[in-house]
Amino acid sequence: MTSSGRAPRFRALRIAGVCFAVFLGLAGLAFVAADSWFRGKYEPALEQQRAELTANVDDYCAQEAALGADPWFHEARTEGNAGPLLNAWLPWPPGHKDVPPGSPLALPEALREDAVDLKQGKWLTANIDVSGLDYGWMARLLAYDRWDLLQDSPLGKGPRINWAAGDMPDYILLTRWAKLRLRNGLVTGHPVEAAQEVRHLAWLSLSTETALGGVIAANLLEFERMAHDSLASPPADWTPMSAEQTDRLSALAVTGLVFSSLASPPDVARKARHCATATSRCLALTEAAFFASMLEPFAKHPFQAAYAALDQDLADLACPTATARGVRARGLNLLDADSGMMTAEQALWIQRAPGHWLTSRIASVVVAMPVGNLQPLRDFHTKYPSTPQAEQAP
């Protein structure tokens, strides 16, 4: 080839080289711009969350100490797992109309939710007949001190645990039975016996180590107090949990998981878990484990310290059930084929650059979004202004 023939070829190569260099430069600028945009979306929100959690962790610990001092947490209970019973008796998931065949929790049509409204204290005065119900199953539960959601349940049998899809038992059915049992105790003149069974049902609900279980426990204890207060002269040996304590329990059940989340500074998360009551600690570990497992393919790198702190506490802190560790080990993540979140092709692309970079930034945005917030704790202090509150960090 002559020099005159090679010249156009070299010019073409130089032009291609320049074009490629310009493309790389533009791509680099776009990458920097995209990275800056993502950081602008999550860094301020994440910093604000971390500052807020750091400022309030001492108050959270103070409220946990006040909650843990309640006699209810120190009542004698027989050791045993009620999971095989309750998991088989309750409908899964919530909202399922019919209880499993043979379950003692089946209600007659006249007492079902769509037949009679028992909300807002109406169960105390409603024109209902509660004498024909068999409450023996509730008394039977007194022989157990915990409820393992993974034992002999739909949640425990699957290869993955997916709470986002509603894989939970129907706690609401328990609240209805509790109202009927308390009403029965009032009508028959044996309210203390009924209250004892409902108090224990509340304990089992809390022992599921879930935020919903904690809120349901607070509701059940509130029903007990309502039944007590409905009597002009309640039995002297009947002392329900105070309104302040049930409200505290409810507030802490939904704020403890925020302190334990990936968004929390690792030292703050560990402090909150270690200062909490055993039931609150295990609840927070379970909820944190679920979200951590779900986001792990994308969030593990940017939140390495948070994952390390969570896994260390899961290993070190004892819980009555294996729920928290089970959720951490088998919790659904967004790349699972059966998650329904994305196709196999999308999952493969995400694990490659720039997909991995993009999803790690998106994960940071998601973590920065408050999955819960501290408003319930603030509302508690507004309702009980005389309650001691730890000084916030500056």
Image: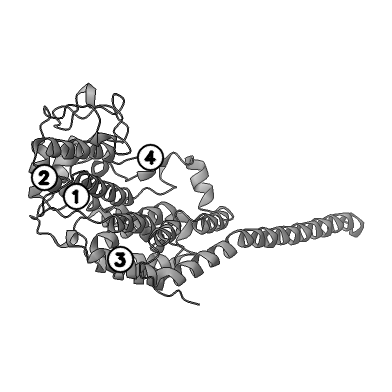
Which tag is nearer the camera, tag 2 or tag 3? 3
Residue at the extreme top: 109
Which tag is nearer the camera, tag 1 or tag 3? 3
State the image coordinates of residue 85 (x, y, percent, origin top left).
14, 40
> Can residue 348 be spotted in the picture?
yes
Q: Pointers 2 and 3 in contact (CB under 8 A)?
A: no
Which tag is nearer the camera, tag 1 or tag 4? 1
* Figure quadrant of residue 297: bottom left
Residue 193 in the figure: left or right of residue 268: left
Real-space CA distance between mark 4 and mark 3, rounded to the nearest whole angstrom: 30 Å
The residue that appears at 32% across and 32% down in the rendered structure is: 95
State the image coordinates of residue 249 (x, y, percent, origin top left).
30, 57
Q: Pointers 1 and 2 in contact (CB under 8 A)?
A: yes
The amino acid marked with disc number 3 is Glu
- Which residue corresponds to mark 3? 64
Between residues 354 and 22, which one lies in front from this camera angle? 354
Residue at the extreme right: 4
- Category of crowding for the residue at label 1, using alpha-carbon neighbours closer than 10 angstroms: few (below 14), some (14–19), many (at least 20): many
Checking the image for residue 141, the label placed there is 2
Dot 3: element = helix
Real-space CA distance between mark 1 and mark 4, rounded to the nearest whole angstrom: 23 Å
Q: Pointers 4 and 3 in contact (CB under 8 A)?
A: no
Real-space CA distance between mark 2 and mark 3, rounded to the nearest whole angstrom: 27 Å
Checking the image for residue 204, the label placed there is 1
The amino acid marked with disc number 1 is Leu
The residue that appears at 30% across and 70% down in the rendered structure is: 275
Dot 2: element = helix
- Which residue corresponds to mark 4? 165
